[in-house]
Image: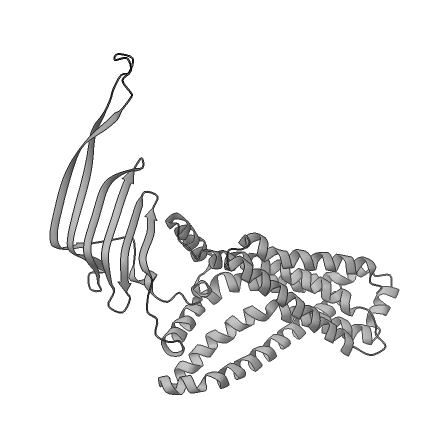
């Protein structure tokens, strides 16, 4: 790497981190001002608030990284163009592609750091942040869904008429197990209660019915002309019942707690496992988790695309100074946020596949960047 590359890389990264710190400080102050009344009503101590905002700034920093690196790119390139540094570099025989190298190296550093942070480190800090928000800032959550159907395994289905997440009691519980699409076992209970000491469920007024199929008999129409083919199955049922039974089920009370931005507190590994669990159960609401997963994978590519576009937008010297180019950079970043939010909303609503919807803004802006690279004079 040449001295010029190091000079550009240093300016680029220092500007990026400076913009991130400034924006995090501004956003944090605004958020703190907005929530002071809630903190006072909840009786939250200063230490708890400080701990909350330590986790908060990490999350905000990861959230604004793609836009801040675009703003930093536009600012550095516009400043270099205004001082005729880019003209001098190109006049010295350096191609524009070669000029982009230090910016792409900086983008690679930021993208790798961002992927590691958003994939594994920041989700762990988000767990405490989200727990704090649910406890002190959000209204008390009550699980109000009725007629709950959950596929807990490929051939095991669970049903509850209702569930009280305050007392951790489920009412009119049923669990059925099938083999070859035939019911072989059925467990019913008037209610189930979570025992925090034993970490198990207690079934009240339960019945366990097992259906043992012995054989199937089939008529032989060839032996008796005109007699239609029929099938009959003989079975023997066994019934066990009682007033109370402790058992371990595959469900946990946490599954009935508030799912407010639950995906923010999941690492990529946990996110993949949870999506697999939801798919195996046939649950709804899986789209939000899929969108979050694909967003984390697409963010590094977003950084490269925005850096490329920022260099093209701001590399030309403007008579009006750098203000117009910086304003153009903010305008393009706003359009990108609009596109990203629009397609994310469509994907979370199930109107578009998550993998495609998340990548559409990247594809559109990559095509715009290539067109600008080809036609915009520098």
> Residue at point 40% right, 65% down?
259
Q: Is residue 289 visible?
A: yes
| Image quadrant in which you'd find residue 93 | bottom right
Is 13 placed above or below 25 here?
above
Q: Is residue 97 visible?
A: no
> Residue at point 33% right, 53% down?
149
Q: Is residue 3 left or right of residue 182?
A: right
The image position of residue 34, as x and y in percent, is 49, 84
| Image quadrant in which you'd find residue 322 | bottom right
Instruction: Identify the image quadrant of the C terminus.
Output: bottom right
Instruction: Identify which residue, 33 or 341, lies in the foreground.
Output: 341
Instruction: Identify which residue, 239 or 71, lies in the foreground.
Output: 239
The image position of residue 180, as x and y in percent, is 31, 35
Is 188 placed above or below 195 here?
above
> Residue at point 82% right, 76% down?
82
Q: Is residue 99 left or right of residue 229?
A: right
The image position of residue 146, as x and y in percent, is 31, 60
């Amino acid at each position: 790497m040449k001295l010029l590359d190091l000079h550009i890389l240093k300016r680029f990264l220092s500007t990026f981190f400076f913009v991130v710190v400034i924006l995090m400080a501004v956003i944090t102050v605004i958020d703190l001002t907005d929530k002071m009344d809630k903190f006072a009503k909840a009786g939250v101590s200063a230490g708890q608030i400080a701990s909350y905002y330590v986790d908060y700034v990490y999350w905000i920093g990861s959230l604004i990284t793609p836009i801040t690196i675009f703003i930093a790119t536009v600012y550095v390139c516009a400043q270099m163009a205004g001082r005729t540094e880019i003209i001098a570099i190109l006049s010295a025989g350096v191609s524009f592609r070669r000029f982009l190298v230090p910016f792409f190296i900086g983008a690679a550093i930021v993208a790798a750091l961002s992927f590691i942070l958003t994939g594994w480190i920041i989700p762990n800090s988000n767990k405490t942040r989200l727990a704090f928000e649910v406890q002190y800032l959000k209204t008390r959550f009550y699980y109000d869904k009725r007629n709950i159907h959950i596929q807990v395994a490929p051939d095991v289905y669970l049903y509850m008429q209702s569930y009280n997440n305050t007392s951790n009691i489920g009412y009119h519980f049923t669990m059925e197990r099938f083999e070859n699409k035939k019911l072989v076992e059925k467990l019913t209970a008037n209610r189930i209660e979570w025992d925090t000491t034993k970490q198990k469920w207690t079934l009240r007024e339960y019945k366990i019915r097992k259906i043992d199929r012995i054989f199937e008999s089939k008529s032989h129409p060839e032996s008796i002309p005109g007699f239609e083919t029929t099938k009959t199955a003989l079975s023997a049922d066994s019934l066990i019942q009682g007033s109370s039974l402790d058992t371990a089920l595959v469900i946990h009370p946490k599954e009935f707690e508030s799912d407010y931005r639950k995906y923010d507190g999941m690492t990529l590994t946990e996110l993949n496992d949870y999506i697999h669990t939801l798919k195996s159960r046939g649950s709804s609401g899986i789209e939000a988790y899929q969108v979050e997963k694909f967003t984390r994978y697409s963010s590094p590519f977003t950084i490269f695309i925005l850096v490329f576009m920022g260099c093209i937008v701001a590399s030309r010297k403007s008579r009006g100074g750098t203000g117009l180019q910086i304003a153009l950079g903010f305008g393009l970043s706003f359009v990108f946020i609009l596109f990203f939010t629009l397609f994310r909303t469509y994907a979370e609503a199930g109107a578009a596949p998550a993998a495609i919807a998340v990548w559409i803004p990247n594809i559109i802006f990559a095509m715009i960047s290539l067109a600008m690279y080809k036609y915009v004079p520098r």
